[in-house]
Amino acid sequence: MTYLVSLAALALAVADQSVLSTASLKCTDIKDKSVPCVEVPRCTTSSQASVTINQLSNGLGASQATSSVSLCFTDTALQVVHKAHGQKYLSPTTYTNCNDAIFYSDVAEFFIAPNMEQEPHCYNELDISPYNVMYDAGIYNPNLNKTSVQGTTFDCDSSNIEHTTSIDMPNHQWEASLSFPFALLNCPYKCPLQKYCGHSTPNNIYRANMFRISQLTSSTACSSSTCEYMAWSPTMVNPPAFHEPTKFGYLLLQF
């Protein structure tokens, strides 16, 4: 099906980020150039978007490790492959159960929201460890920063997230493959703002940030001195803090 959108309607959709559109916007259409943007294609054998995580989250320069993240989508899910390179150490973990505090150790993190307002107050935090343990939570962030984070975890099995990981320490890397259902992404868990929910099909725009925490020493617990905190879109907060939705970038699905 071909969708016809007037220039006026397209301009409105770009200017007012609370407007849902059936058009496939391009990154050049997004007026906010202060955060990154990526155009995400439908999944085929040769069609994926790729972004690089190679900056410290606090904005103080390049990270030692890097990650490459591939994205594409199907009718029902966003497909993500996070390849973590330059992994110097990987300590044994005590975080072995759903919703253990894996964010205190090596982890890949995905914060994502449907595009219902200019700066998302509700989003899902979806984290995975190299050992294939998930942390899943709905976040309500009324102040749009780390001071007001209200997180509610939800059962990993009922999330319908498909996920696998593999570790290759001889080559200093690990990889996570995830499938995030749009039914989950389109309705951040326990969001008190009614406008966020009600869609199970993909929206054309999502707001997101992607992070990685990587060990620099053989310590079993991460801090800013033992691990590096990396972001696709640096949050510019020091000590490192990830819950800064004003820094979320744009994922533009190409229908």
Image (cartoon, rainbow, N blue to C red):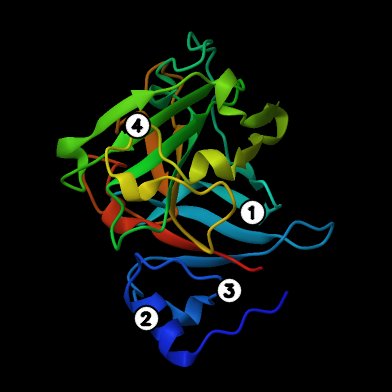
Q: Do the residues under discs 1 and 4 have CB atoms within 8 angstroms?
A: no
Viewer-proximal residue among 90 and 111:
111
Q: Amino acid at mark 1?
A: Leu
Mark 4 residue type? Lys
Q: Residues within 10 Å of mark 4 (few under 14, many from 20)?
A: many
Q: Nearer the viewer, mark 1 or mark 3?
A: 3
| Residue 12 lies in quadrant | bottom left
Which element carries disc 2, helix, strand or loop?
helix
Say which quadrant the N terminus sits in.
bottom right
Q: Tell me the mark number nearer the camera, choosing from 3 and 2.
A: 2
> 7 or 100: which is nearer to us?
7
CB within 8 Å, label 4 to label 2: no
The number of discs equals 4
Residue receiving disc 1: 71
Which label's residue is closer to the chain start, 4 or 2?
Answer: 2
Q: Earlier in the sequence, mark 4 or mark 3?
A: 3
Q: Quarter-wise, where is residue 187 in the image?
A: top left
Label 1 environment density (alpha carbons within 10 Å; few <14, some 14–19, many ≥20):
many
In which quadrant is the C terminus drawn?
Answer: bottom right
Label 1 residue SS: strand
Upstream in the sequence, badge 1 or badge 4?
1
Q: What residue does disc 3 label?
A: 24
Look at label 2 and name its amino acid. Answer: Leu
Mark-to-mark CA distance, 3 and 2: 14 Å
Q: Position of residue 138 (x, y in %)?
A: 38, 33
Q: Which residue type does callout 3 highlight?
A: Ser
Instruction: Determine whether label 3 and label 2 are within 8 Å by CB.
Output: no
Q: Which mark is residue 190?
A: 4
Residues under numbered marks 4 and 3 in contact, where contact means CB atoms less than 8 Å apart: no
Disc 2 from disc 1: Cα separation: 27 Å
- Quickly name the residue at label 2: 12
